[in-house]
Image: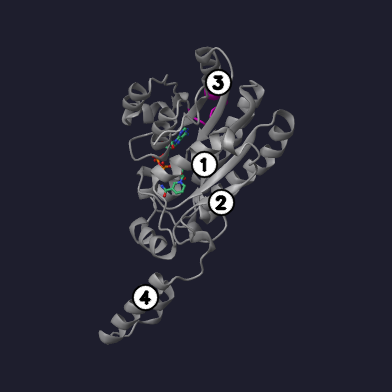
């Protein structure tokens, strides 16, 4: 259902690669709510992905930009402000990539060149986007900037690797810049910490299916879908959340407040029973790897 929450609002949406992308779902919802926006992604993603299909559907301009490149971002903001003939109201940063995760290099054997790339693409790019927006004075007063994060910023989750460090930096950037931009121009900056979600980036995380099953069992409301994340983004772009800033907001069905749930415990007990009934004794290395 649409509520016209973004009627008259303009924005930039980073990261809609294909119809599974959280940014894609957010663009569709923003369009339904009356927003106009520019879509952007890397030149390579625009060639390989389906962004042009979304752009046609939402009547959007597409401007290529690698979010780690200041010249690309300057070009993006110049074209966007020209296109709308004025300032914008919201930005979605929905960008993440780790070469270490992609190449399955473990955290304790990390490649530092890749690590810097992870940090640049998944965290620093957020700073670069905000700093460029600020330099161009691109946002109207009470504008809203949102980036997507994950609970691995606070808690250690098996196999999330250097993306955990990037998400911790991302959330810190939201607070640090949120103070400066809020005080100066009443711009709010928040991160949404989303449940594991089956997207192109999500499926790169080793063991994502098992993780999603676990978080589904742990969270009293179950995992939040990409569509539900899009809904949350819309509220943060709308005028209904004007005084929410510098926050990391969990959209995870309650997972982040849980220690152990009945459903997860049942599953754990079942695997213990199974171990006993099989009469199989784990050796020390197997136990250590659990
Ligand atoms: N899928 C999940 O389980 C999950 C959970 C929590 C948070 N997130 C976060 O949500 C965001 C969106 O990811 P998604 O799950 O929709 O996957 P996705 O793969 O659809 O989106 C990731 C996007 O980042 C873009 N990107 C990569 N490098 C870039 C660069 N240098 N410049 C500009 N764009 C670049 C990709 O082209 C892609 O469009 C990411 O920040 C991700 O970490 C995802």
Q: CA distance from mark 2 to mark 1?
A: 10 Å
N-terminal label among 3 and 4: 3
Instruction: Kindly identify which residue carries mark 1.
Output: 122
- The nearer-to-camera label among 4 and 2 is 4
Q: Quadrant of residue 137?
A: top right
The residue shown at (32%, 78%) is 270
Is 265 in front, or is 121? 265
N-terminal label among 2 and 3: 3
N-terminal label among 1 and 4: 1
Q: CA distance from mark 2 to mark 3?
A: 28 Å
Instruction: Kindly identify which residue carries mark 2.
Output: 165
N-terminal label among 2 and 1: 1
Instruction: Kindly identify which residue carries mark 3.
Output: 77
**Residue 115 location (% of width, % of height):** 52, 47
Q: CA distance from mark 3 to mark 4?
A: 52 Å
Q: Is label 2 in contact with label 1 (beta carbons under 8 Å)?
A: no
Residue 71 falls within the magenta-colored stretch: yes
Q: Secondary structure at mark 4?
A: helix
Mark 1 CB within 8 Å of ligand 1: yes
* Extent of the magenta region: 66-73
Q: Quadrant of the N terminus?
A: top left
Q: Secondary structure at mark 1?
A: helix
Is 25 in front, or is 15? 25
- The nearer-to-camera label among 1 and 4 is 4
Mark 2 CB within 8 Å of ligand 1: no
N-terminal label among 4 and 2: 2
Instruction: Kindly identify which residue carries mark 4.
Output: 266
Q: Secondary structure at mark 3?
A: helix
Q: Quadrant of residue 174?
A: top right
Q: Is label 3 in contact with label 4 (beta carbons under 8 Å)?
A: no
Report if residue 6 is visible in the image. Answer: yes
Q: CA distance from mark 4 to mark 2?
A: 32 Å
């Amino acid at each position: 259902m649409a509520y016209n929450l973004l009627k008259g609002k303009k924005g930039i949406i980073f990261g809609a690669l294909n119809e599974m992308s959280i940014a894609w779902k957010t663009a569709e919802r923003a369009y339904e709510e009356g927003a106009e926006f520019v879509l952007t992604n890397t030149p390579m993603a625009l060639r390989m992905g389906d962004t042009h299909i979304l752009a046609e559907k939402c009547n959007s301009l597409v401007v290529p930009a690698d979010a780690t490149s200041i010249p690309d971002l300057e070009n993006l903001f110049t074209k966007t402000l020209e296109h709308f003939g004025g300032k914008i109201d919201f930005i979605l940063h929905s960008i993440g990539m780790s070469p270490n995760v992609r190449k399955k290099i473990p955290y304790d054997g990390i490649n530092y060149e890749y690590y810097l790339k992870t940090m640049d693409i998944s965290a620093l790019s957020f700073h670069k986007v905000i700093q460029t927006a600020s330099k161009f004075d691109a946002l109207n007063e009470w504008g809203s900037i949102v980036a997507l994060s994950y609970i691995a910023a606070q808690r250690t989750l098996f196999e999330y690797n250097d993306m955990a460090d990037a998400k911790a930096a991302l959330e810190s950037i939201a607070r640090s810049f949120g103070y400066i931009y809020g005080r100066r121009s009443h711009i709010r900056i928040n991160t949404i910490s989303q449940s594991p979600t089956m997207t192109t980036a999500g499926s790169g995380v080793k063991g994502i299916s098992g993780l999603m099953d676990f978080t589904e069992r742990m969270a009293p409301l179950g995992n939040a879908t990409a569509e539900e994340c899009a809904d949350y983004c819309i509220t943060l772009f709308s005028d209904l959340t004007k005084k929410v800033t510098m926050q990391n907001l969990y959209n995870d069905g309650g997972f982040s407040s849980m220690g152990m749930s009945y459903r997860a415990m049942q599953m754990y007990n079942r695997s213990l029973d199974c171990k006993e009934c099989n009469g199989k004794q784990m050796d020390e290395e197997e136990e250590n790897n659990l």
